[in-house]
Amino acid sequence: MFTLREVNVTQIIETVKNMVMSSEYKLPEDFIQAIKIVKGKEESPLGKEILDEILKNAEVSEKEQVAYCQDTGYPVFFVEVGQDVKIVGGNLRDAINEGVRRATKEGYLRASLAYDPIFDRKNTGDNTPALIYFDIVEGNKIKIKFAAKGGGSENQSKQAMLKPADGLEGVKKFILQSIANAGPNACPPFTVGVGIGGTFDYSAVLAKKSLFRYIGERHPDPRIAKLEEELIELANQLGVGPLGFGGTTTVVDVKIEVAPCHIASLPVAVNIQCHAARHIEVEI
Amino acid sequence: MVEAKVITTPLTDEIIENLRAGDKVLINGWVYTARDAAHKRMLEEYEKTGKLPFDVKGQLIYYVGPTPAKPNQVIGSAGPTTAYRMDKYTPKLLELGLKGTIGKGWRGPEVKEALKKYKAVYFAAYGGTAALLSKHIIKVEMVAYEDLGPEAIRKLYFENFPVIVANDIYGGDVFEEGQKKYRKLII
């Protein structure tokens, strides 16, 4: 079906370096457009002013090629490797980490990883090791998705193992409570990634992965699409507002992904994404 | 638009008494940076030696870990980090004379009480607007714990650094008050 294709790690290193740096300097265009739209609807004068500052910050960081946020994040990758790709010159994981290392140095990014989480918490100095989820797919391409996940919003993310009896109402309540609790700590307006189903761990992976969808792009299943729309509306009634100072813009979007789950379980994960919504996707 | 109050460090009780939750403030003068790792080390050292790496009396601590400066910059991007993570350490620092902190997000009840008790404020800067905020920092000096990299204690010279009073000495809370006005759904 597909011809076997060789990809040299030097190309992967360069691609990763460039995508990391550009995503730290420039927010995705769909997110910027969404902020412009919600600014027009925001009822709080301070909230409007903050949305303006967010847009100005995006302009300055892009123009001056500096980090949008000082928290340049935990590098998270979703990599889909075509089964007809042959990596040459080294291994894929090392190449991705090398790209991150170079982006950190050449792009003046903050080293934000503690190697050991509980004992000495020494900084690794170069933002490696990145967190990499690999998947094998059809074809002879490599798709690399990158998110720079800030600690402030990641800290406010939540997971719950609900009971099947909690049902749709329980799921909605948990999602909205998570958003309200995240509040000013996690730099709203948020994009909220939700994973429902799967296992304990997989629900969280789904939540994170859902954040790669475009702003405004609804789930193909109309029932889930409707739930997303309903949650956007309800979340914006919580009053959190831009940066939590109060207002009608708490979320710009809610993304839901679902997976089959055990008959005894109803896992739900809510991954909060701050307004430094750094997500980028490249195909090699 | 309400005029911002302009203040200069070090801060006195008189300056603090004049600040109310929701006030826009422009800060001038030297402030110190410290976040998670620096707080932990600083207070562990204080337990052992009775000394801090700098005199906190009248001073402000900005919760920030900046990106490295590019060759043409004084400092890299430098927005606030979430403040509640420092709650464990803040009351002690306020007791020792610290007059305020700058961060983002809610503070816990112990910190709010300590602000009243020791006459100090908690300012919120606009989280995530790090490229803009760095333009209000015109000088940087290393103070202590250089090995902590982005978490080292530095001295920053602020020029009209914009913040909002989040918690004052009268029990005011800008987040609670602001959100209440727009809350249509209680969950």
Image (cartoon, coloured by chain):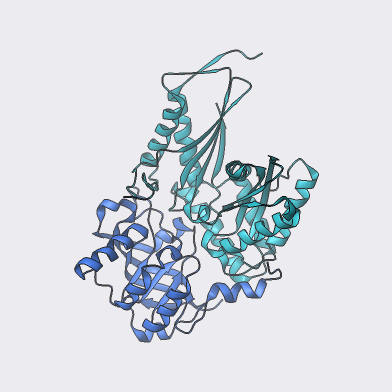
Question: Quick one: A32 or A160, which is closer to the camera?
Answer: A160
Which percent across, then down, holds residue A187? Answer: 54, 59
Q: Residue furthest right?
A: A222
Q: Which residue shows up at 50% across the image and 68% down it?
A: B106
Which percent across, then down, holds residue B148? Answer: 29, 52
Q: Which chain is blue?
A: B
Whether residue A279 sits left or right of residue B55 in the image: it is right
Q: Which residue shows up at 56% across the image and 76% down it?
A: B1
Question: Quick one: A92 or B64, which is closer to the camera?
Answer: A92
Whether residue B153 sits left or right of residue A223 in the image: it is left
Q: Which residue shows up at 66% across the image and 60% down it?
A: A176
Against B143, residue B179 (above or below) is below
Question: Quick one: A169 or B177, which is closer to the camera?
Answer: A169
Residue A194 seen in the figure: yes
Quarter of image, res B65: bottom left
Q: Residue furthest front?
A: A264
Residue A50 seen in the figure: no
Q: Which residue shows up at 69% across the image and 42% down it?
A: A258
Against A253, residue A49 (above or below) is below
Where the C terminus of chain B falls, by quadrant? bottom right
- What is chain A's hue in the picture? cyan
Which percent across, then down, holds residue A261? Answer: 69, 41
